[in-house]
Image (tube, rainbow, N blue to C red):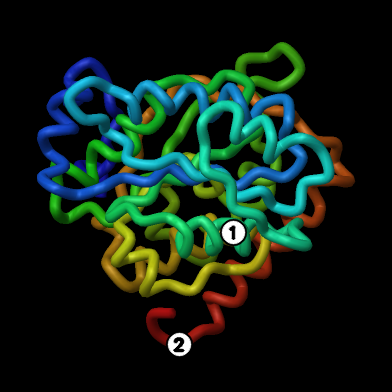
Amino acid sequence: MGEHVRAVSGGAPSVPELVAAKAGRSISVCLPARNEERTVGPAVAAVRPLLEAAGGGLVDEILVVDDGSLDQTAARARSAGARVVAQWPGGDKAAAMRAGLEASVGDIVVFLDADVENPTEHFVPRLVAPLLVDATTVLVKGFYDRPLDGAPTGGGRVTELVARPVIELLFPELAWVRQPLAGETAAHRWALEKLTFADGYGVELGLLIDVARRFGVESIAEVDLGVRVHRNRPLDELRPQARDVLAAALGRLEASGPT
């Protein structure tokens, strides 16, 4: 497995090289967003140069799924240049991702979180590179450092306290995955359409387990996205996320065969 874990660095393909490697394929970038009026605009703006590049961009469309927002998320996303799809009543990340998959047209679909404080143009190229240059790759997960309260690391509490221990105990073949709950992920449409998205915040772990079962652990790759800064939620808001993650893992443990 180790040889299939790709930390994209200076030797990674350039954006023009990736555009050439598309070979007629299209790429959609989808951002599920709920009440993210402050950050969704910059998140979309970070992707826009990849859409508007002279001579043909790496990205073919940017889609924001407004997941029942009560603020100006949809308006800010449109102003930044995204197409907006409404998901109502909202509040379910898995449903928002399913809506994004159904509404998008790309052969490759990239999901990005809309609450990131430091979105950069390199997220998408790094996520799609393994899918474009290696036919064996099906799913790509981002990994990164997550600051907490001024410290360089410490974020990702549900990941460290729930997801990673559950994986180590129940799905040890995936224990090498650094950020199993990363919202920054990319996959081939044909693969996503064969899978069942787990409910709520369990969707990321469910996809990881399902891809490993159906296509093999070696079909999963990781890429280094550097530092990812976003809002750190209080513990009482993390409990529903932890519950969904645990439910997704236990549901797949009980399932017989690929989902």
Q: Earlier in the sequence, mark 1 or mark 2?
A: 1
- In this view of the protein, which residue sits in the foreground, 210 or 110? 110
Across and down, in percent, residue 247 comes to 67, 69
Vertical order, 173 against 155 (above or below): below
Across and down, in percent, residue 180 comes to 50, 48
What residue appears at the point 19 percent right and 49 percent down from the top-left corner? 25
Residue pointed to by mark 2: 256
Across and down, in percent, residue 61 comes to 39, 42
Looking at the rendered structure, the kind of residue marked 2 is: Ser
The reply, left or right, for residue 6 in relation to residue 11 is: right
Residue pointed to by mark 1: 166
Looking at the rendered structure, the kind of residue marked 1 is: Val
What residue appears at the point 67 percent right and 30 percent down from the top-left corner? 76
- In this view of the protein, which residue sits in the foreground, 183 or 83? 83
Is mark 1 in CB contact (under 8 Å) with mark 2?
no
The reply, left or right, for residue 180 in relation to residue 41 is: left
Across and down, in percent, residue 194 comes to 36, 74
